[in-house]
Amino acid sequence: MIQDPLSLLERAPELVPLCDDTKIRRAIEQGNPFKLYRALFWARLGGRHKPHRETLRTLLANRRLFALPLKRMPWLATVNSFGGGFVGSAESDLQDGTYITTHAVVALFKVPLFPLGAYVVRPGDGRTWQIFARVPLGPIAWLWSRGLALGTLALIALGAYGAFHSSRFQPVQVLNGFSQSLVATVGNRHVTVPANSHVVLEDVPVGRQQARATTAKGVEVEVLELTISSKPAFIAWNIAGAAPLYQATVEYWQHPPSPEPPPAEPKFYCGQRLVELGKIDDLFREPPKTVSMSKDETRVSRSVVGVLSNPAGGAAVCGSVLRQENQGLAAAPLLTAQLRLSNFAANDVSMAIYALAANPKEALRLASLARETHADSLEAHRNYQLAADLADEFARVREEYRRRAEAAPDSADAQYLYTRLLRGSQSQAAIEKLIARFPDHPFILRSAIYDRSIAGRWKELDQAWTHLQKKSAKDAVPVLEYEVSALVALDRGADAERLLKELFASPDEATRELVAELYVHVARLMKLPAPDGLIAELEKSVGEKLWALRARSGLPTQGAKPSPLIDLLNVLHRDPAQAVALSAALSPNEVAGLSSVAWALAYCEAVRTQQNAAQKTLERSARFDHDGHETLLRFVRGEAVSLDDTSAPFDVRAAARIVRARNRSLSAEEREGLIKAALAGDPLHGLLAEAAATWKG
């Protein structure tokens, strides 16, 4: 017996011979006419019950046989032409005026978007309906609804998978601010990042991952552990913090205020190796020039993230930014990477030590790596000694090099490296002995030139420099200022002028700047026309005014943009109090831009007047002998100490004497002697002479 709770077999006796089909029989027994209609549809579509094919076609063409009573009225309201409505008609009954229509989500009142069901209806007056029963959806509408439902499920599944995937994996932007391509590895993922560029590394597992960056030849640039989070919208590994990654906010106004506010300063992430940010509107692309706004909006903001492009390269930009912000610790990974890329080139190591003057332990670490890499390089040892002095380890290092010298008595290098760590008369005597033994050693000659400048032995200095230039012209340039001073002191200004013009032909830009600055002083003393002639030639070659160089040379700077450095240089020779006040605002880059004399005058006056802010700012420099630092401070303050046993150069000693002479607690005779001694070491009569004449105690 077949259970038939809805008497479907009575409605359609043609179903009886089809009850052998399990699905058809089950639908009848369940009292589900909609399910029965679908079973008949799939039976016909699948080619089953071929003897009853015509019966199936007839049954499927009459959906009223499968009607169910209404449970609730369908929703037929629309808002702004969007909502629910009846669409289309089928199986019309001409006698009673009814037909079957599809109930669907509609747009523009009649455009079906999603079928919801089918009903037997008869239109009434206006937009009213008589609704009699529910019937199954037709095959097309049913397949449409199921397709949309499956699509929705697929989207949900895809979204769920995306959420699950993003909780376990994240794309990581890898940024390379260096001038050569690098191979970056995060976990087990690898990617090659071109020079000054960025590449996305897909599907990096969330959590702690080992990261490593190397050159194509395998030189290790950076190794660290990155913690990859699943939350940020943007994650970047900025290798060694070298790429100038920035975030900026761009604002759009409906009616811009007058005056329009200046744009907010971008935030740079120089020195930060792992960068995590939230929502970004414009990533590595220019923001749109205009945006759409509703009438109620007055302002719209967009977040922009990019990498600053600069011909000097990203690492150079970030190094400058970090020095400007006095971020010595943050700069350490960048400087380390740069040194590894250059195989610890001596000039790069020296620049790194100066950049890390406020972080001397890190400077010493890098200098140690450089010395290990180039154990036979005098420059590597000199840099190591400088870094050790900055780190207050001078005594330890001097003892180390004393033992080295004793172990190699016939080595000019070993003897030089120890002797240069001696101080005062002991140093001068030792250097003179070395000159006799090793007359052609460039660095011993340079030490002799340095010592002879302090002692005012100008003729012997000139002989040593001339010999050095013949043996190694490049080693003579760093002590050129002493030779020019010697020539002027020996009343050979014309020789100094000729020498400077010859050296100005050098292809090295730093040498040309030094020569141009020295030429200003010589030209003034000799009353030559156009003292700024060589500086003007430099400016033609670079296409801009070199205002800092002009200010350092004592030339007028009308037309220069205001800056603490230029302002300080302009007042230093006449107003010590204002100069010290301006010193406190200098950035590390600007401190490095001061000449040795300018730095020494400002620093010593800050010490004498106890201007702590200016003193700390100016101490962010590797200019002075740390071993004799306390002696210098006591001397400037007026205590009974001598600078003779320090290694301070003549310009620092002269500046200290001028500042000490401002102490009115000293006798007039002593003050006069200090000024005389200071000027004896300044045959060029530059800034020291001006300060001595105008700085009144």
Image (cartoon, rainbow, N blue to C red):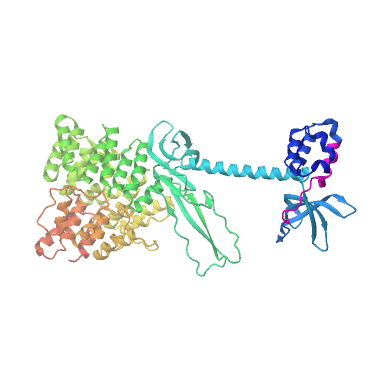
The residue nearer to you, when weighing 495 against 46, is: 46
Indicate the quadrant containing the N terminus: top left, top right, bottom left or bottom right. top right
Question: Where residue 300 sits in the image (x, y, percent)?
Answer: 54, 61
**Which quadrant would residue 23 be assigned to in this image?**
top right
129 horizontally vs 240: left or right: right
Report if residue 60 lies within the magenta region: yes
Report the number of numbered marks. 0
Question: Where residue 163 sits in the image (x, y, percent)?
Answer: 53, 44
The residue nearer to you, when weighing 10 against 238, is: 10
Question: Where residue 587 sits in the image (x, y, percent)?
Answer: 33, 55
Q: Can residue 506 be seen in this view?
A: no
Q: Which residue is drawn at 63% across and 42% down?
A: 154
Q: Is residue 576 above or below residue 318?
A: below
Q: Is residue 545 above or below residue 201?
A: below
Question: Where residue 468 sits in the image (x, y, percent)?
Answer: 24, 39
Q: What stretch is highlighted in magenta?
A: 55-74
The residue nearer to you, when weighing 260 against 76, is: 76
Q: Residue at x 78, y 52 (%)?
A: 133
